[in-house]
Image: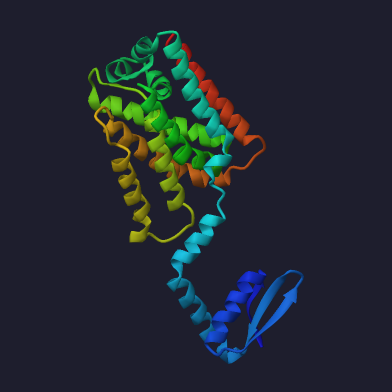
């Protein structure tokens, strides 16, 4: 008998044996420590390979489910995301307590007119301001649903930097589109950027030839934009530009992030993120 598959886990070996046995293909198992080799007769080798390939093609959804289970993307384990949500709440509470809410929006909001006149810091500071409690609660929920998985997948520092980058880029593009006194605030641009980043992560998960299926995450992302862009005062274009900023940057970022591995990468990225925010605040002084 010849080896068909080697170094399988017990669970996968059981599955392969079940597939081959159902096709009346004689098998033998050899154990090496906790891993297993599957052997079949030489004349059954080609048939066995075809049967296994057919099985996996017919069970793509099951394989996707297994892949997703292997990725730790639980929002509730991201302390960084909770810290960002806490920062949103703290800024909003302080603005209301000191009765400077409207002043802060006028001074730090993403005004297209002032951004085009050089006050680019507004594209960053506007992400931390919210119109009211409902607006704040919606963006905190969005950070938990979309932002936290990005941070979990990328790292507490690199993920935070990418959220800031996508949100800032989305606000800048939005300002250049309007070229008027258009004023926008809220973290929703960054949150839609997070949705775009998640789509980019799925698209760059494995090196595959381009197929129509590759576009499915983008279609899903456009549905998300439509779902989360309801409301009278919603800046739909900021959502759109935030999403595509996250998508475009994520296609470059995720492969790069997998390649660049060095000590304290996340600490450095977090320091850069905080430094950029500090520069934006000082730029308004």
Asked whether, in this view, residue 270 is left or right of residue 92, the answer is right
Q: What is the image's colouring? A: rainbow
Residue in front for this viewpoint, 240 or 76: 76
Query: Foreground residue, 146 or 138?
Result: 138
Left-right relation of 139 to 50: left
Instruction: State the residue at coordinates (46%, 30%).
Output: 164
Foreground pick, 140 / 254: 140
Residue at 55 percent across and 52 percent down: it is 71
Q: Quadrant of residue 70?
A: bottom right
Depth check, front residue: 207 or 112? 112
Quarter of the image that includes the N terminus: bottom right
Q: Residue at x 43, y 47 (%)?
A: 200
Looking at the picture, how far across and down is residue 285, in whole percent? 44, 8
Q: Position of residue 228 (x, y in %)?
A: 33, 38
Does 34 appear above or below 86? below
Furthest residue to the right? 33
Q: Position of residue 204 (x, y in %)?
A: 46, 51
Question: Which residue lies at the image location 58% right of the left edge and 75% below the top edge?
Answer: 15
């Amino acid at each position: 008998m010849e080896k068909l598959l080697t170094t399988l886990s017990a669970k996968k070996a059981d599955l392969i044996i079940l597939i081959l046995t159902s096709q009346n293909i004689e098998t033998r198992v050899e154990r090496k420590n906790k891993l297993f080799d599957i052997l079949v007769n030489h004349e059954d080798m080609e048939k066995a390979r075809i049967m296994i390939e057919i099985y996996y093609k017919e069970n793509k959804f099951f394989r996707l489910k297994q892949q997703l289970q292997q990725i730790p993307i639980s929002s509730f384990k991201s302390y960084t995301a909770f810290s960002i949500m806490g920062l949103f709440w703290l800024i909003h509470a302080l603005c209301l307590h000191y009765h400077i809410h409207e002043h802060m929006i006028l001074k730090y909001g993403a005004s297209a007119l002032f951004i085009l006149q050089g006050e680019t810091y507004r594209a960053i500071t506007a992400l931390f301001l919210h119109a009211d409690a409902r607006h704040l609660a919606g963006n905190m929920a969005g950070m938990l649903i979309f932002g936290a998985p990005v941070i979990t997948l990328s790292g507490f520092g690199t993920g935070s930097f990418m959220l800031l980058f996508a949100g800032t880029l989305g606000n800048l593009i939005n300002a250049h589109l309007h070229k008027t006194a258009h004023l926008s605030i809220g973290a929703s641009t960054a949150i839609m950027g997070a949705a775009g980043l998640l789509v980019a992560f799925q698209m760059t998960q494995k090196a595959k030839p381009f197929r129509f299926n590759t576009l499915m995450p983008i279609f899903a992302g456009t549905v998300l934009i439509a779902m989360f862009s309801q409301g009278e005062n919603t800046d739909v274009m900021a959502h759109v530009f935030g999403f595509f900023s996250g998508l475009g940057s994520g296609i470059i970022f995720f492969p790069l992030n997998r390649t660049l591995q060095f000590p304290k990468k996340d600490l450095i990225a977090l320091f850069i993120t905080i430094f950029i925010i500090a520069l934006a605040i000082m730029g308004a002084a």
